[in-house]
Amino acid sequence: MSTWLITGCSSGLGRALAEAVIGAGHHAVVTARDEAKVADLVELAPDRVLSAALDVTDPARAAAVSQQAEDRFGAVDVLVNNAGYGYRAAVEEGEDADVRALFETHFFGSVTMIKAVLPGMRARRAGAIVNVSSIGAQVTPPGSGYYAAAKAALEGMSGSLRGELEPLGISVTVVEPGGFRTDFSGRSLTQSRTVIDDYAETAGKRRKERDTTHGTQLGDPARAGRAILTAVESADPPAMLLLGSDALTSYRRVLGTALAEADEWEELSVSTDFQD
């Protein structure tokens, strides 16, 4: 039995993962900005589930929730940074305050949570950190530049973190979901107030009022929750876990295109070396 601390459990993948963790018999610390929205999860197993109000952009709350988890269950064995929301805008349309808030949640909020649990994990020489990203970090679709950038920052940090923690017995896994039938493309999707007509055929096609993907995604959140659980409990958790056939297909396409372009420009790339 291990203790999982999961952020953003009010809906979507966070809630599905919490249900999988609880169903597997583990301890779970389920969090949301509004604690009332996770009260029903506590009822699933009151002796094994602790709820807490948590805004990941508040370092004091992050530290307090981590301490609550340790006081109740003795340790945090697995941290899942899942809290987040979507933001769509052409790069030129994005409002500075909104973009900074996006990074505060997705990137800096995750870092805050990591720093809150790492002292305990290091002391025990054991633990797992799961950072939920998005296939968007690889695909970088028009209209999602800032969201993709925030997730790419999370992934870059995670790669270095994995190298730092692996010798200490702590795993780091990035999860890249494709499209899942959650509220992500509905209630949890925000966008810029500024609209520039020149982007109507690129970023504009993906604004909320023109997006028809909500409710039609291939991904099953319950299956995703069980997949994350399986990966973390494996003998060698992956550096990256792709979720969904669409994510896998897109990732392979991005890699193939990148390799082909590298080959095409190989001569110019190597020409910049000193010539002996």
Image (tube, rainbow, N blue to C red):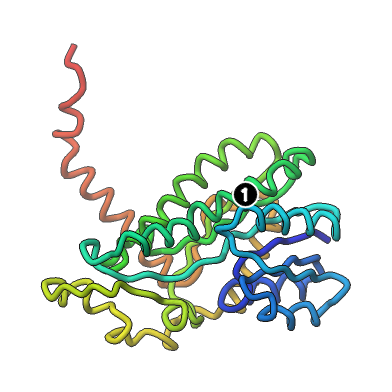
Q: Residue at x 21, y 76 (%)?
A: 204
User: Where's residue 230, x and y in %?
Assistant: 67, 64
Quadrant containing the N terminus is bottom right
Instruction: Estimate the x, y position of residue 267 in percent, counting from the top left.
Output: 15, 34
Q: Disc 1 marks which residue?
A: 114
Looking at the image, residue 141 sits to the left or right of residue 17; the answer is: left
Q: Amino acid at mark 1?
A: Ile
Place of residue 50 in the rendered image (x, y in percent of width and height, measured from the top left)? 79, 69
Q: Residue at x 19, y 72 (%)?
A: 202
Q: What residue is at 67 percent from the left and 48 percent from the top? A: 116
- Furthest toward the left, the residue is 198
Indicate whether 272 appears above or below 95: above
Horizontally, residue 35 falls left or right of residue 275, namely right
Residue occupying image coordinates x 76% and y 67%: 28
The local secondary structure at tag 1 comes to: helix
Foreground pick, 251 / 134? 134
- Name which quarter of the figure residue 245 lies in: bottom left
Asked whether residue 167 appears in the rendered view, the answer is yes
Q: Residue furthest right?
A: 47
Residue 252 in view of the camera:
no
Category of crowding for the residue at label 1, using alpha-carbon neighbours closer than 10 angstroms: few (below 14), some (14–19), many (at least 20)? many
Quadrant of the image occupied by residue 70 = bottom right
The front one of 245 and 208 is: 208
The front one of 276 and 20 is 20
